[in-house]
Amino acid sequence: MMGTLSARIKHRLNASWTRLCRWMSLRPRVTGRIKLRGRTDRMSIHPSFRCDGDLWLGVHSDLGAITIKEGVSASGPLVVTAIQPRRIGAGTLFGPNVLVTDHYHGDLRDPAHRALPPSLRPLHSPGPIEIGNRVQLGANVVVLSPTRIGDGAVVAANAVVKGDIPAWSIYTGINSPARPLFRDDSDGE
């Protein structure tokens, strides 16, 4: 019993120390608030990364990881969360208020998830997200999974991205209305 308790305390201290070290390394490069959640040991952030605003990074599974390559900059706030490996290529530019997430609370195609409140559902990811080199994401862009954005692509402000965007292309989502991805026509029984 004592060995197990000692191991748990040691694990929590190591996790807290890792989080503190990661936070301290980011502090001079982020002008706003920094929130690090989950597996901070699975975050790899190049020393040249800069964020002129708030930064929220979260790795919420043992398989998840966030890798930010050299020369990446963000206007902030920037939110990147992952339960799968996430790569942000070199020289990428994020406008303000960008969200990159690969997961949702539950898979509504699974009837067992429907009975649970969203906060109690297991995290579900439909696939990976990869952002290539020298990509530009405008203000208020949301990147959902599965998505691959090719090198040099530009995504205009207010776009919601899901799917493949070819290299060296410009995409906009302002004129696209929301459309259903899944609909359950049963009465919930």
Image: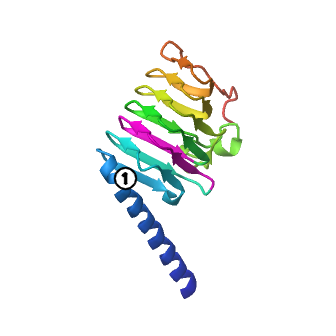
Residue 89 versus residue 10 in the image, above or below? above
Identify the magenta region: 63-82
In this image, 36 relative to 43: left or right? left
Check the picture and name the quadrant holding the N terminus.
bottom right
Would you say residue 66 sits in the magenta stretch? Answer: yes
Query: Mark 1: which secondary structure?
Result: helix
Total residue callouts? 1
Residue at figure coordinates x 35%, y 50% from the top left: 34
Q: Position of residue 44 (x, y in %)?
A: 51, 52
10 Å crowding of disc 1: few (<14), some (14-19), many (20+): some
Residue at figure coordinates x 42%, y 61% from the top left: 19
Would you say residue 5 sits in the magenta stretch? Answer: no
What colouring method underlies this structural image?
A: rainbow
In this image, 105 relative to 17: left or right? right
The residue under label 1 is which amino acid type?
Answer: Leu
Q: Position of residue 157 (x, y in %)?
A: 43, 22
Residue at figure coordinates x 67%, y 30% from the top left: 187
Spot the residue most to the bottom.
2
Q: Position of residue 7 (x, y in %)?
A: 54, 79
Q: Nearer the viewer, residue 47 or 99?
A: 47
Which quadrant would residue 164 be assigned to in this image?
top right
Q: Which residue is mark 1?
A: 26
Q: Position of residue 67 (x, y in %)?
A: 53, 47
Residue at figure coordinates x 31%, y 47% from the top left: 33
> From where the camera sits, is residue 146 visible?
yes
